[in-house]
Image (cartoon, rainbow, N blue to C red):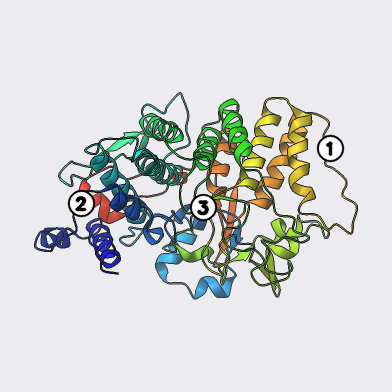
Amino acid sequence: MKKKTTFIYLFIVLGTFFSCKKYLEEKSNKKLVVISKLEDMQALLDDAATMNNVSTPSYMESAADDYFLPPSVYAAQPLVYQQLYDWEKYPYRYSNDWNKAYLAVYNSNMCLEIIEKITRTSANAQLWNNVKGSALFYRSFYYLLLAWQHSKIYDRNTSSSDLGIVLRSGTDFNVPSVRATVEQTYQQIIGDTKMAINLLPAQPQHVLRPSRAAAFGLLSRIYLSMGMADSAYRYADLCLQIKSSLMNYNGDSDLSGSMSASLPFKRYNKETIFYTEMFQGFGLHAPYQAKIDTNLYQSFDLNDLRRTGFFKATNPYHQFKGNYAANANNLFTGIATDEILLTRAECLARLNRTVDALADLNTLLKARWKSSVVYNPVTAIDSRDALNKILVERRKELLMRGLRWIDIKRLNKEGMNIMLKRISNGETLLLKPDDPFYALPLPQDIIEQTGIQQN
């Protein structure tokens, strides 16, 4: 218990740094635990409260189009939340997505610094590999989400000049923070993740820990967001070779009863490859108040079990309940087999392998269809038709997982012309595909403390 308390205390001190310089100056007078052993580092990375739970960026989900706020709900929001909902820049401060993500990055960097002082031997090789691989994975995982949220979409023509995120390679607070380019950001993320692959076990002891399957899945995310279908396909396929299990929504040991249950899916279910949850800092999209886009809800067939499993009627609208976190408010943002299967299907369609793409899509949809009704497989006249149908199902399957914002950005880069619309105080607001707001603003306190450039 004493050891656990010490670690928790360390996390609190480190987390506070990101918003409060005064506390940083005072911390030198506090007694902090010295982490020096592999077991200590594994414990640091195993702290789910910091590394997994309620930790991933939320701003991009609040800015996306899977939900809306009815007028009465909007009117009840504080002014800052109304401005966020209206896609206005607001000088938000701690506590926020930035400090939550960079706390996980800090812990990862600490482990990467210390492990270089420990010799890898045959006796400690398994733990040594897992610690280093996990630290590299976590850093890449959070860097990618921050890049999706705060940077422009990857464009090889402009990536060497577009602003990326801050890449911290160590724990020295005296090293100035500067924004890397988008190119540097993605190359760092890719390099670290590929290094992690060679260190992590194929499957973890628990899905709260990174694994080789998770690293393959992360690489498929990275390359898909960069518009590189061949590489995204390769790593999605490697991921699914390790883990490809799907829940049958008609009945499964990982379901909490029927699809009509308030929380139908168990936490850490068989589709989960790596588990994280979304930070609640920008809670506009929280299921208890956000309503699902009505056109999106209506797109689910009456015989599609997701229509019942994902949504709860709140007359006259519907709210989301299809959460793999098994929690009414915390949204699952980890890596799961349904996402990776859809990624592989999309990439196959982009590579003109239409038959294989549809096979993946139908594998997923059949597991979501009422078994009492004959399932008619999805067909397509060509690869473009298949791609369009896969993208429709991606939107439906992966809503409220923190993926919609980057999907909008990458698809608009291809010319999909997705226009976001909100009605606020009777006024129609539009977010056009080329709006610079797609690189969301950074926290104001970070701008003031570091002098880095704001979006």
Give neighbour class at mark 2: few <14, some 14-19, many 20+ (Cα, 10 Å): few
Q: Which of pointers 2 and 1 lies earlier in the amino acid sequence?
A: 1
Which residue is under mark 1? Answer: 379
CA separation in Å, label 3 and label 2: 36 Å
Q: Secondary structure at mark 1?
A: loop
Drawn side of residue 20 relative to residue 323, left or right: left
As drawn, the label of residue 449 is 2
Q: Secondary structure at mark 3?
A: loop
Q: In the rendered structure, which disc, 3 or 2, sits on the residue that comes first in sequence?
A: 3
Q: Measured from the top left, where is residue 295 in percent x and y?
A: 71, 57
Report which residue position mark 3 lands on.
Answer: 207
Is 363 or 222 nearer to us in this picture?
Answer: 363
Residue count near mark 3 (Cα–Cα under 10 Å), binned few <14, some 14–19, many ≥20: some
Residue in the foreground of this view, choosing between 351 and 3: 3
Q: Position of residue 287 (x, y in %)?
A: 57, 67
Q: In the image, what residue type sits under mark 2?
A: Gln
Residue type highlighted by circle 1: Thr
Q: Residue furthest left?
A: 29
